[in-house]
Image (cartoon, rainbow, N blue to C red):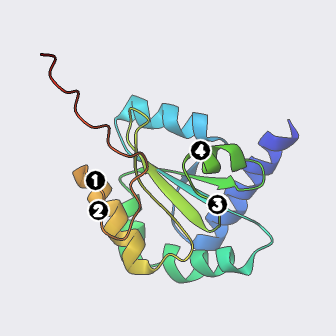
Amino acid sequence: MVVCAASALSCVLLAGCNGGIHWEGPSYSDASATARRTNKLTFVYFRSWYLVECTNFEEQILKQPDILAETRSVVCVVLDYDWDRPLAQKWGLKTVPAFAIVAPDGNVLVRQAAPITHDDLLRAIRSAKKGATGPATQPAVPAKPPASPKP
């Protein structure tokens, strides 16, 4: 109950701070359910409330008009890194700010941890929308080699 309340409060506070991104929540499972139902990508943003780097990322990058425009067509969720560390680490994200962009089927298309520039984020969102990983992002899961034909 405390986790849900903290997550809900974080969504409200961050929504007010960044001036435009609509944050779903309060959890990744809620946001991914919405994404599956609407067949949209999920932008998962990990932050720590006590790090100025996260506040700077929100103020200097997430408020940019082109970022806001790109995020309008995806489901967005903000997660507290301390509470949701297992998910972040599952996706290879070990520092914040960090993000992952997840397909409706749960496949992580792109991910990146700090440092994240405006161009990194914009390129990641656009490439995820095309279904490809961009050069500024790290592929989330190594591609499995094709099965070799049996003799």
Report how far apart the C-alphas of labels 4 and 3 lie in the structure. Answer: 9 Å
- Residue drawn at 50 percent across, 75 percent down: 116
Residue lying at the far left in this picture: please name it.
151
**Side (left or right) of 55 relative to 3:** left
| N-term-proximal mark, 1 vs 4 | 4
Give, as a three-letter code, the residue at label 3: Lys
- Say which mark, if any, is on residue 126: 2
Give, as a three-letter code, the residue at label 4: Lys
Which residue corresponds to mark 3? Answer: 94
Q: Is residue 86 above or below residue 34?
A: below
Q: Residue 100: x, y in percent? A: 49, 54
Query: SS of the residue at dot 3?
Result: loop
Query: SS of the residue at dot 2?
Result: helix
- Residue drawn at 31 percent across, 54 percent down: 128
Badge 3, how many Cα within 10 Å: few under 14, some, many 20+? some
Residue lying at the far front in this picture: please name it.
151
Report how far apart the C-alphas of labels 1 and 4 lie in the structure. Answer: 22 Å
| N-term-proximal mark, 3 vs 2 | 3
**Side (left or right) of 94 relative to 38:** right
Query: SS of the residue at dot 1?
Result: helix
- Say which mark, if any, is on residue 90: 4
- Say which mark, if any, is on residue 73: none
The answer to whether the residues at label 2 and label 1 have Cβ atoms under 8 Å apart is yes
**Residue in front for this viewpoint, 146 or 14:** 146
Which mark's residue is nearer the viewer, 3 or 1?
Answer: 3
**Side (left or right) of 40 relative to 95:** left
The answer to whether the residues at label 2 and label 4 have Cβ atoms under 8 Å apart is no
Report how far apart the C-alphas of labels 2 and 4 lie in the structure. Answer: 23 Å
**Side (left or right) of 97 relative to 149:** right
